[in-house]
Image (cartoon, rainbow, N blue to C red):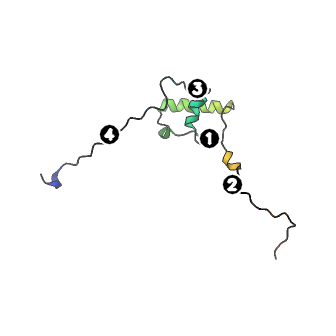
Amino acid sequence: MDKSKQPFHKPKRSFRRRLPPIGSGDRIDYRNMSLISRFISEQGKILSRRVNRLTLKQQRLITIAIKQARILSSLPFLNNEKQFERTESIPRATGPRTRNK
């Protein structure tokens, strides 16, 4: 058969099925901090459903649990620890200020 007339075949790829991030025994609750903290970014934002690989119902329950934990002060609203850290000390002038003209 002529190569130009061959039907296009995609090469078959084997794929590994990913495990669901929430097991059947895990309860989605505001008190389950080990579960909730997996779905929060370093800045304290709730990660999207696409990133989490959750179903719509699971994402809604996670979002509600995170918001309840924030209101009850179990979780911070923002994680600003890096904002206040200084990497280098900045030298400052300690003498009297003089204006350049």
Q: Earlier in the sequence, mark 1 or mark 4?
A: 4
- Assign the C terminus to one quadrant of the image: bottom right
Q: Which residues are magenta?
A: 86-91
Real-space Cα distance between discs 4 and 2?
46 Å
Q: Are marks 3 and 4 in contact (CB under 8 Å)?
A: no
Point out the frontmost of discs 3 and 4: 4
Q: Earlier in the sequence, mark 3 or mark 2?
A: 3
Q: Earlier in the sequence, mark 3 or mark 4?
A: 4
Q: Are marks 4 and 2 in contact (CB under 8 Å)?
A: no
Q: Tell me the residue that label 3 is attached to.
A: 29
Real-space Cα distance between discs 3 and 1?
18 Å
Real-space Cα distance between discs 1 and 2?
22 Å
Left or right of 78 in this view: 17: left
Real-space Cα distance between discs 1 and 4?
36 Å
Tell me which amino acid carries mark 1: Gly
Q: Earlier in the sequence, mark 1 or mark 2?
A: 1
Query: Residue 87: which numbered mark, if any?
Result: 2
Image coordinates for residue 74, horizontal then vertical, percent = 67, 31
Q: Tell me the residue that label 1 is attached to.
A: 44
On whether residue 14 falls in the magenta region, the answer is: no
Q: Residue at x 79, y 62 (%)?
A: 92
- Give the secondary structure at mark 4: loop
Real-space Cα distance between discs 3 and 2?
38 Å
